[in-house]
Every structure is written in structure tokens, then in C-alpha cells.
Image (cartoon, rainbow, N blue to C red):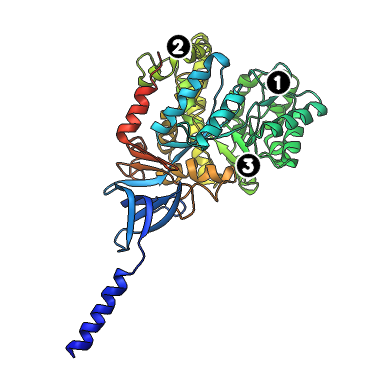
Amino acid sequence: MIRPLFVLLLLLALGCKNEPIETYELAITNAHVIHLETGKVALQNIYISNGKIAAIEAAETKTNVRADSTIDATGKYVLPGFWDNHIHLRGGDSLIANNKNFLKLFIANGITTVRDAGGDLTHSVMDWKHQIAAEELVGPTIFTAGPKIDGPNATWAGSLEVETDEDIVKALDSLEKLKVDFVKIYDSRISGKNYLKSIVEAKKRGFTVSGHMPFTVTLNKTIAAGMDGIEHLYYIMKGCASNELDVTEKLKNVEIGFWGAMPALMGAYSDSTAQVTFKTLKDHDVFVVPTLHIGKTLSYLDEVDHANDPYLKYMGEGIVKTYEGRIRSAMNASEEARKNRKELDTFFGQLAKSLNTAGVQLLAGSDSGAFNSYTYPGISLHGELQAMVQNGISPLEALRTSAYNGTKFLGQTDRYGTISEGKVSDLVILEGNPLENIENTRNIHSVIKGTQVFSKEQLNKLLDEAVMP
């Protein structure tokens, strides 16, 4: 009996010895992996090679694995790298260096992807985009709209101004030539007719389209034209007001202006109208970018002193100078206008919660960049997630509005958004559980961006390097 048992044990030992060793570039072991698609947290090991997630296994699984380097993530939480779904890289040639400097701030804050919603630095942005993809430059993956589409005498420099059907064709030809990732339409000067036509024509060419909305058109017409994403909540509020048609006519007749319409629309908010609007948004798969954090920041410029903000040192004098317009406007506003702005800010928080409850897909976006006073690249995305939770959205649902929903909006779900085999290894490792406290998104242990690994020390070094003279 002893000899057969000995032979069996010997065969088993030889079999184990001949089992092939799997070799990976990086192993993240004993991690609490947050799977955003299900909300489940699993204790797992993640193996990475060639900038992609090669394998995932339960932490207790015994396999024949070797890794060139290992991160022991015991007690830590891993989720997809954050996406900031609304930023701006802009401000003219004199601010190119400042904007390039922002790229470090995004990575230092665990943001591995950004959606640049239109600006006037397109050639620089495209250059950075390609350098980042080749890992020649530290920064987030950039999906950019390039220049915005608007009407004649547009507010923002670099906009493609359209006044005729021919202009719309030329603008879209230009965007196709630039190889932008989506189309952004602004509302400062564009006519309602050209706005709707631009959406329709952009969709014909296969573009994802997002934008503001002229108050001279209704939200239903915007959705029917094919709009994929609504930036900011002003336009959603308009579609939830029982007097939307009346206000639209007054705007067309120049009886009131954009800000003059706000109290009337907010006062006419109708839950029954809103629920129909929410269903329409959901049925047409329209995403909404609430931008709550910047709303709060701008609404209280008259009360909050930002002189000692820690992130001012990363902006540089040129960016800070662009803040002056909004600050001056806030300080010179009447008491009634200030009061209305703060009431609107509170209302938007409630509206974001209602949209989420109704199943409308939200996108976390900071709107950070030049001209948007004290809304700092990188850290403001965490402020946005926190604002969502403060208004009643669960931490899990708030987290989904970043990478998970961002990938769906831009059609990138085969590459990003979840922690699964074959996806790009853009990951953030947190010291604490963000599902228990959303502020833990700020407490970053390390960031993985493709094949690049940034430790806490390296992230702090990026911040040191980002200080502007």
C-alpha cells in the first residue's frame, strides 16, 4: 500500500513542478476591487501586462504566477481611473504652458481620462493627446471636441461660427479633418434653426454630440434632433418647467434674456412635466452633465475668499487673470441677482438627484479650466462627486458617473470603465473605501495609467513640479 501511495505523490509533485509559470509586468495583490457595474467589492489580485488587465483572480487563489513588480494593496480599494467628463483646455497661445501643466494635476488626482469640451488650443491638445497615448508625456487620455460650433461673433475664441447651411457643412468638414472625438455646440450666438441643423448633420456623420442649448428652442426638439449629452442643468430645468413654451417665445422676441428667464423657469418647475422629460431623456439615451461643483463655486464668489486656496499655486498668473471677469460680475450683481443665483444652485442639486432617481445617466464633469474661477483641474472632479453625494446620490451611483458612464457616452466600453480582463489598465488605488465615504476618492495610494505606475511619492512629485512661477 505504501509504494502506490509514494508513486502517486511523486507524480503529483512532478506535475506541479512542470506547471507553466505565468509572468506579468505588474501584480496588484490582496485588493478590494470595486466593480462599478455591479457595486460588488471583491478581494482579488489583478495582473497587468502591456498596459492591459491580463488576468483577475480571487486573492486566495494559489497559482503559479510571477510579476516583475508587485503592489501589495492589502486594506486598499481599486477602481477604474477617474474620468473628468467636462474640462476645458483653452485661453490662447499665452496660456499653452499653463494648460499643459494641468495634465500633471489630473494624474495626481487619479484622473486617467478627460473629455475636453471645446477650446482654442486644438493643435496643442492634439499633440499632447498623441504624446500621452505614446507615454511620452504624463497626462490623462484626452477625448476632445476641438473648437466649438456657435453662431456669428461667438463668445469663445476659436469657435466655428455658423450662419448658413454651408457654414455648418464647412464646420463639420473641419472637425472631421481635425479628427475630433465628439462635437460640442455652444449657445451664445447660434440661431435655434442652425443649432438643430448642426446636431442633425453631425449625427449623420457618426459624431457623438453634446452641448448647451439656445433658449430659443425647446428641450424636446433638441433631443429629437439627436443630442447625446446636455452640458449643465439650465436646459434640463427649462424642459421641466410648465411654462417652457411661453419662455421660449419671449426669448425669441427678445423680451427677456437667459438669466432673466431663470426665476420664471425655476418657479414653474412641474413634477409631472419633469417626469415626462426625464423619461424622454432616458428613452433617448441622453446623458446629462450636472456640473454642481462649479455651480456652487461661482454662486458664492461674493462670499468666499479664495485667496489662500492650495491649488492657486498651480494655476499661474495668466490663468488667475482669466478669473477676473466672473469675479467682477459676481461682486457687481444686485442683491436680488445674488439671491437668485444661490437659490438656483440649491435647486440644481435637487434636480440632479431627481434625474438620477429617474434613471437618467449622469456624467461627472468639473468644467475646470481658464475663465472658470477657482474651479481647479484635478481636485474639482472630487468636489463634483462629493456634491452629488451631498445632494442625495449614493456614493456608488456618483462613482459610476465618472469612468463607467463616461465610457458609455463616448462608446469606449470595450477599452475602459470596468476592471475586467482585456481592458486598458487605467486604475486608481485608494487608501479607504469610497462607497462608505466619497471623500476617500481624494486619498490616493497610487495610480496606474497603462504601463505607467505612479506611487504616492511620485504623485506628490508631480504636484511639486506643477507649481507655476
Vertical placement of residue 317 versus 74, above or below: above
Provide the residue designation for mark 1.
Answer: 189
Q: Is residue 39 left or right of residue 214?
A: left
Provide the residue designation for mark 2.
Answer: 317
- For residue 277, the mark is 3
Q: Is residue 42 visible?
A: no
**Amino acid marked by disc 2:** Glu
Q: Name the image quarter holding the N terminus.
A: bottom left
Q: Quadrant of residue 21?
A: bottom left
Q: In terms of sequence position, does the residue under pointer 3 or pointer 1 come before the other?
A: 1
Q: Are marks 3 and 1 in contact (CB under 8 Å)?
A: no
Q: Residues within 10 Å of mark 2 (few under 14, many from 20)?
A: some
**Circle 2 or circle 1, nearest the eye:** 2
Q: Residues within 10 Å of mark 1 (few under 14, many from 20)?
A: some
Q: Position of residue 84 (x, y in %)?
A: 49, 35
Q: Position of residue 269 (x, y in %)?
A: 59, 34
